[in-house]
Amino acid sequence: MEQQRSCSICIAGAGPGGALLGLLLAKAGIDVLVLEKAKDFNRDFRGESLSPDARKLLEVSGLKDYIDQHGFLESRRMDLYENGEVLLRMDIGSADVEGRSVIEFPQPVLLAAIVEAAKQYPNFEIRMGVSGKELIQENGKVVGMVVGNSDESYEVRSKLVVAADGRYSKLRKLANLEADIKPVARDVLWFTMPRPGNWQAETRIKLVGDQQLILLPTYPDRLRAGINIPAGTYKQFRSGGIERLYAIVDELEPDLKQVLREGVKGWNDVALLDIFTAEVPQWSIDGLVLLGDAAHTITPIMGQGIKHALFDARLISDVIIDSLRKQPEQVILRSQLLAWETQRQKDVAFTLGFQRRQERLFLLSGNGKTMFRRMFYRTLNKLGFAKRRLLQKIYFGGIKWI
């Protein structure tokens, strides 16, 4: 049994951020070990929307051929409806920026592509089915982890541990980095169905009172869909039978009756996602840094989670490369990471603020409150300049960092 090994950087978690960071560091000649708790990249629910700036980042990181060869679906528009009326139309194609579309690309394929690209470099290693168990600290600094699974356990010594282990981050807790977790008043039931042949490649959000349905076209020929239920009521909701889910979707989007029943035969075809946001005031300590959902858990609104994880990785890779170039034998300190952390917190704060405002609007009920919501979205829809500014901030804001 292996007792101890060492590497410059140890990354816990091979989601979009952790995998991309591994690739960028390996390209720079840094020896990096990536640990992934799961044995493969297939999950019940994974975001698949890549904003234009996230796509550009992946392309300049050497992944354009992988993406093009696999194929993807382009989406240029998001329509928000209430009671069948289009209140807001967000046309990404109207933004005066190159690459004016969101692409829908399966996340398991994306992660496999990033890892395969990284494996071209002899200083990259990934171990599946392995996770961090304990932090190793000496003189107040993290100098590695005890890692393993039910069959083995060993030490990994490193100059920096990157906790990219997701929204329920174990390493964040082990490092005593407190998260301000704010539950959202809804859970989401996610499912897929065949995409009707006449369905436009657009995102649709359908509202009736405080009930919501989101519909996302996905590659190659499916619709991802989600309905909201009050937080913590899944067991009660499920007791009403799958017909209860059918009834909600039928009311919000009657044209999907047939394909819904083809795609969702029972509860095994439905995934529950509990929605919350988490802000972590401090993302790092000496020898350890949080990345992606471990540092900032955001909601699925407008597909921003993958983007922020990827840009976390892109920007911190420069910091790590520079730190190791100057002091190759030294643990990377929080003071060296602080400028990166401050900038990324500003970028994430905008997204969190935007999403929380939408959550409040989506959950309004009653005639007076929903009338206010309709007025708000109708007014925004008429303000072309404001819509373009918002689109550029959400979908193209990372371009300046590429």
Image: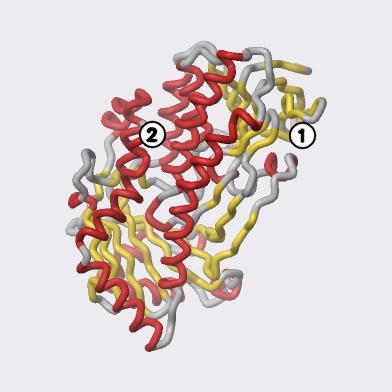
What is the image's colouring? secondary structure
The dot on residue 134 is 1
The image shows residue 183 at horizontal and vertical percentages of 59, 64
Which residue ends up furthest to the bottom in the rendered image? 367
6 sits to left or right of 34: right
Dot 1: what SS? strand
Q: Is residue 196 above or below residue 18?
A: below
Name the foreground residue: 318 vs 268.
318
Q: Measuring 75% from the left and 23% from the top, which residue is drawn there?
A: 155
286 sits to left or right of 349: right
Query: Which of marks 2 and 1 precedes in the sequence?
Result: 1
Q: Measuring 49% from the left and 24% from the top, which residue is drawn there?
A: 318
The image shows residue 339 at horizontal and vertical percentages of 54, 35
Identify the residue position indicated by label 2 in the image.
Answer: 401
Quadrant where the N terminus lies? Answer: top right
Name the foreground residue: 357 vs 153.
357
Q: Is residue 84 above or below residue 18?
A: below
Q: Amino acid at mark 1?
A: Glu
Q: Measuring 45% from the left and 46% from the top, which residue is drawn there?
A: 347
In which quarter of the view is residue 236 placed? Answer: bottom right
The image shows residue 234 at horizontal and vertical percentages of 57, 69
Q: Measuring 45% from the left and 43% from the top, which residue is drawn there?
A: 308
Q: Amino acid at mark 2?
A: Trp
Q: Label 1, label 2: how many angstroms apart (C-alpha)?
A: 34 Å
296 sits to left or right of 354: right
